[in-house]
Amino acid sequence: MSKILREDLSDFQIREKSFPWAAEIQVGARITQPMKARLTKLTVAQGVSESQLIRFLLMKGLSEYDIDALKAS
């Protein structure tokens, strides 16, 4: 799974660079401390920032419902 995640994250990083995020938009989420610990561990293992990993997970979740959030303007 780690190799698949790393490949998907690499593809996401390349794709995200061509669709820059608006700086004035912020989103908040509440997560449990155990989930935060798992996310932190995963970001260190994958070599990405927490915010980028959360954006990636959000995009993957939206894609399950056929929503391309980078092109949804």
Image (tube, rainbow, N blue to C red):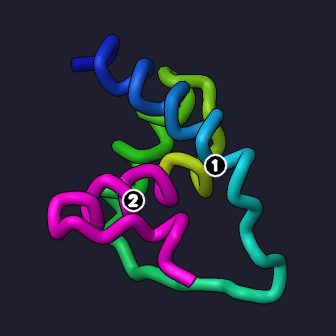
Real-space CA distance between mark 1 and mark 2, rounded to the nearest whole angstrom: 10 Å
Rendered-image quadrant of the N terminus: top left
Could you tell me which residue is drawn at 17 percent across and 60 percent down? 64
Task: Give, as a single range, the part of the protein colored magenta.
Answer: 54-73
Q: Are marks 1 and 2 in contact (CB under 8 Å)?
A: no
Work out whether residue 50 or residue 67 is closer to the camera in this orientation and state it: 67
Asked whether residue 58 is drawn in magenta, I would say: yes
Left or right side of 20 for 57: left
Q: Is residue 10 left or right of residue 57?
A: right
Instruction: Return the mark for residue 16.
Output: 1
Q: On the image, which quarter does residue 33 sit in?
A: bottom left
Residue beneath disc 2: 59
Q: How many marks?
A: 2
In the image, farthest residue toward the right: 23
Compared to residue 52, the image places residue 24 above or below, namely below
**Quadrant in the picture for the C terminus:** bottom right
- Pointer 1 or 2: first along the chain: 1
- The residue at the point 65 percent across, 43 percent down is 49
> Could you tell whether 34 is left or right of 6 in the image?
left
- x, y percent for residue 52: 59, 50
Above/below status of 9 relative to 69: above
Dot 2 amino acid type:
Met
Q: Secondary structure at mark 1?
A: helix
Within 10 Å of disc 2 (Cα), the crowding (few <14, some 14-19, many 20+) is some
Amino acid tagged 1:
Glu
- What is the x, y in percent for residue 29? 44, 80
Percent of width and height locating residue 53: 50, 47
Q: Residue at x 51, y 30 (%)?
A: 11
36 horizontally vs 10: left or right = left
